[in-house]
Amino acid sequence: MTGLFGATSTTDDVLAGVDLSGKRVLVTGVSAGLGVETARALVAHGAQVVGAARDLAKAEAATAAVRALTANGGSLELIELDLASLTSVRASSHALLADKRQFDIVIANAGVMAAPFGHTADGFETQFGTNHLGHFTFVNRIAPLIKEGGRLVNLSSSGHRFADVDLDDPNFEHAAYDPWLAYGRSKTANILFAVEFDRRHKERGIRATAVHPGGIRTELARHLEPGTLEAMVSKINSDLAAEGKPNYELKSVPQGAATSVWAGIVAPANEVGGKYCENCHVATIAEGQIGPTVEGVYAYALDGDRAKALWAKSEEMVGERF
C-alpha cells in the first residue's frame, strides 16, 4: 500500500476507484486551500461531508463548486466553528452531538502558521490555542460520534521540527515569542494529540494519525511578509544545489491534500494508527538535524509519555476532562 503513492500523488490519484457512498466525513477549515480540496475530493467520490469554518460566508463562496457536485450522491454542508474560541467550539460540538449522526472520519485540517504574537478569545497563545487546543476540545467532545472503525486525521507539518511542546510555558509568558517556534510547538502538539487519541480509542477500532501535507502555496502563509516563502524556497534550493541535489518543488493543493485522504481512507488502519505520515506513506524516525526537504519525524513528537502529559495539560488549560 505504501509504495503505490508518493510526493506527487494527488487526491484523485489516491481515491481512484474508491466509492465513498454512505461515508460521512467532517473536515475543518473548508474556506480555503487544503480544506476545500479535501472536501471536493471526498464529495466527488460520494461522501457526505460536513465542512467546518470560522467564516461561513467565505466558506460558502469557496465551496460553491463543491456543493454542486451531486452526480455521485456526495454532499457538503457547512457549520460554523471558530477554533480560537472555546465558546464557538462548544456550541458547534453541542449541535453535532444533538444531531446524533455519526462520522466515519474526522479530518482536523484548519490552522494558522507563523502568526504574530496574540491570544485566542480564551487567552491562549494564538497558534497553540487555535491549532491544538481548539481541535483538542472539539474532537474530544464529538468523539462519541466517531463510528467504530473510524479515523481521526490531524494536519501537522514538518514544522514540528522547529520545537517540542513546552508544557511549562505554553503561552509564552516567560520565553520570548518567535512565530516559527510557536508554530513548531503547535504542530508537535497535533502529532502528540493523535498519538494519545489513538491509544485511548483503538480498542473501539478508532485510529488516529497525523500528516504533513508538504510545502504548498495556500492562505496558511498569509502572515508571512511578501517574498518570504520565495526566499525560503530559494535558500533551500541553494543548499540543495551545493549538495548536488535537485531543486525543491512546492506541491500543488491536490498533491498537498493527498496524504490526508490517503491516511483517512486508503491506508490500512493498523499501518497509520498512532503514526506521522508524509508523501502518502508512514514517516521514519529522523536522526539528528534534518533539513526542511528531508523526510522524517522527530522522536519527541511520537513519545507516548509526552503525549499523555500534553493531554493532561490540555485538559487543565481548557477546563474539561475527556
Image (tube, grey):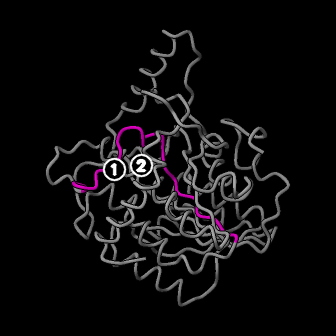
User: The magenta stretch spans which residues?
Assistant: 149-170
Give the residue pinned by disc 2.
Answer: 188
Relative horizontal placement of residue 67, taking residue 114 as reference (left or right)? right
Relative horizontal placement of residue 56, taking residue 48 as reference (left or right)? left
180 or 224, which is in the foreground?
Answer: 180
Q: CA distance from mark 1 to mark 2?
A: 6 Å
Q: Tell me residue 293's x, y (percent).
A: 52, 28
Q: Which residue sits at x=28%, y=51%?
A: 166
Q: Quadrant of residue 314?
A: bottom left
Relative horizontal placement of residue 65, taking residue 240 as reference (left or right)? right
Eyeballing the image, is 204 above or below 261? below
Q: Tell me residue 126's x, y (percent).
A: 29, 57
**Which residue appears farthest toward the right when viewing the image?**
17
Q: Which residue sits at x=74%, y=70%?
A: 74
Question: Which amino acid lies under the numbered mark 1 shown in the image of this protein?
Answer: Val
Question: Which amino acid lies under the numbered mark 2 shown in the image of this protein?
Answer: Thr
267 or 35, which is in the foreground?
Answer: 267
Is the C-beta separation of discs 1 and 2 under 8 Å?
yes
Q: SS for tag 1?
A: loop
Q: Which mark is residue 165?
A: 1
Q: SS for tag 2?
A: helix
157 or 1, which is in the foreground?
Answer: 1
Relative horizontal placement of residue 140, taking residue 11 as reference (left or right)? left
Q: Give the quarter of the figure containing the C terminus.
A: bottom left
